[in-house]
Image (cartoon, helix red, strand yellow):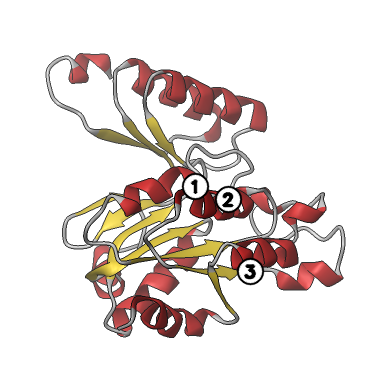
Amino acid sequence: MREITEKERVDGTVITVPLAFAPDAAYEAIDAGIKEIIIITEGIPRRDASAIVEYAELHGARLIGPNCLGLIVPDVCRFGSLGGPAVDCRKAFKPGVVGVMSRSGGMTTEICNALTLSGLGVSTAISIGGDPVIGSTYADLIPLFEADEDTKAVVVYSEPGGTAEAELARWTQEHKSRLPIVAFVAGRFMDEMPGMSFGHAGTVVNKKVDSPADKMRRMREAGISVAEEIGDIPNLVRERIGN
């Protein structure tokens, strides 16, 4: 890879190799000086994923994933496989004012499609990854949306497990975010079924802060609107941006 970066400008890379080769592919990209790295490969062991994340941070590279589908800026670029076939992607993702971050690649497309049909459209959509250890969390990425003049609101799709929502809530409170945020928390039935695993590997719940109910409480306390249904998201966004 370095042979290419020494001759050509390379802004980013998408890693889709089999699991056994994914860590080496990530290290090779980082060593070659690539600063934007998306890892679509899923199931990388936590120890290996943590090492990749740390190595990327030490070298000033931004890592999205593992176990993600990448990102889209509608009518500008698609970096990864988010949205599926191009013909479907063009229908679901239209330029607009709402940024989207989601643990689920499929739900990223569903939410963006709803925003497109409502006339709000999408500024940038990011599938951040469903594995337990990922390179960029909601709190890591929200400053990029803050700096984007085209983004007027942000939608977050959340799943059980992890502390990413608590970190986002704390960030919005500490930095007085200019952006209204609307969130949807999946897997609420898990509050009534302790010990049940759901969806992605990153949704293993083992403490109170991980529960859907706790995520919803923390986000609401931080001023984040929490939708009861996916279909409520566009209207909540319109209410928050006064449109």
> In this view, which residue lies farthest toward the left?
7
Identify the image quadrant of the C terminus.
bottom left
Please give the count of numbered marks on the rendered protein. 3
Relative height, residue 107 to residue 172 (above, below): below
Of tags 3 and 1, the one toward the viewer is 1
Q: In 3D space, how far apart are the residues under numbered discs 2 and 1 (Cα atoms)?
A: 9 Å
Q: Residue at x 22, y 33 (%)?
A: 11
Relative height, residue 55 to residue 221 (above, below): above
Q: Residue 170 carries which label?
A: 2
Relative height, residue 208 to residue 39 (above, below): below
What is the three-letter code of the residue carrying label 2?
Arg
- Left or right: 221 as drawn, with respect to 86: right
Front in this rendered view, residue 120 or 19: 120
Q: Which residue is drawn at 27% across and 69% down?
A: 97
- Residue labelled with disc 1: 139
Tag 2 and tag 1, C-beta contact below 8 Å: yes
What is the three-letter code of the residue carrying label 3?
Ala
The local secondary structure at tag 3 comes to: loop
- Left or right: 185 as drawn, with respect to 234: right
Residue 218 spot, x, y in % from top left: 66, 61
Place residue 27 in its image quadrant: top left
Of callouts 2 and 1, which one flags the residue occurring earlier in the amino acid sequence?
A: 1
Of tags 3 and 2, the one toward the viewer is 2
The reply to whether residue 174 is in sight is yes
| Residues packed near mark 1 inside 10 Å, few (<14), some (14 to 19) or many (20 plus) | some
- Residue labelled with disc 3: 186
Q: Residue at x 21, y 14 (%)?
A: 3
What is the three-letter code of the residue carrying label 1?
Ala
Front in this rendered view, residue 48 or 215: 215
